Amino acid sequence: MSGSPPDERDPFAPIEASPRFATPLAVAAMVLGVLAAVTGLAIVVGATGMVLGLVAHVKGSRLGLPATAVAAVGMIAGMAIVMYLR
């Protein structure tokens, strides 16, 4: 018994953050997802888009998870196109 009360806060509770800066991240993730489908740099651009989408989702943007999915689909489509054209 150290005398200090235990922390009552749940460590797995969602963080109350403002989605103020999260929406531009989600839009950037969607743009990178489209670019991943049309450029030859699908792995780099798509992965960056997925990371930005997940960051936007964690920050509270409602577009974060769909942006991550768009980036993932764009990356897969871009890799398929590159493999087909080889």
Image (spheres, rainbow, N blue to C red):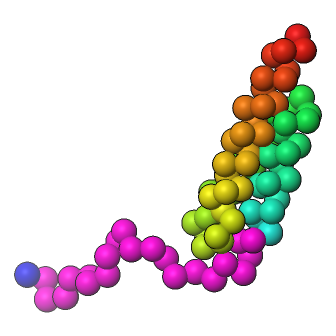
Compared with 66, 13 (above or below) is below
Figure disc tally: 0
As drawn, is 49 to the left or to the right of 39? left
Residue at 39% across / 74% down in the picture? Answer: 13
Q: Quadrant of the N terminus?
A: bottom left
Asked if residue 10 is among those painted magenta in the image, a careful observer would answer yes
Vertical position of residue 79 compared to residue 19: above or below: above
Percent across and percent down for residue 27 are 80, 62
- Asked if residue 47 shows in the view, the reply is no
> Is 20 left, or right, of 15 in this rendering?
right
Q: Is residue 38 left or right of residue 18?
A: right
Residue shown at 72%/39% (left/top)?
A: 73
Which image quadrant for residue 24? Answer: bottom right
Magenta segment, which residues?
Answer: 2-23
Residue 56 lies in what quarter of the image?
Answer: bottom right
Foreground pick, 51 / 35:
35
Can see residue 41?
A: yes
User: Left or right: 82 with respect to 66?
Assistant: right
Image position of 44 with respect to 54: above or below:
above
**Image x and y of residue 34, in percent:** 85, 45
Front residue of 52 and 2 = 52
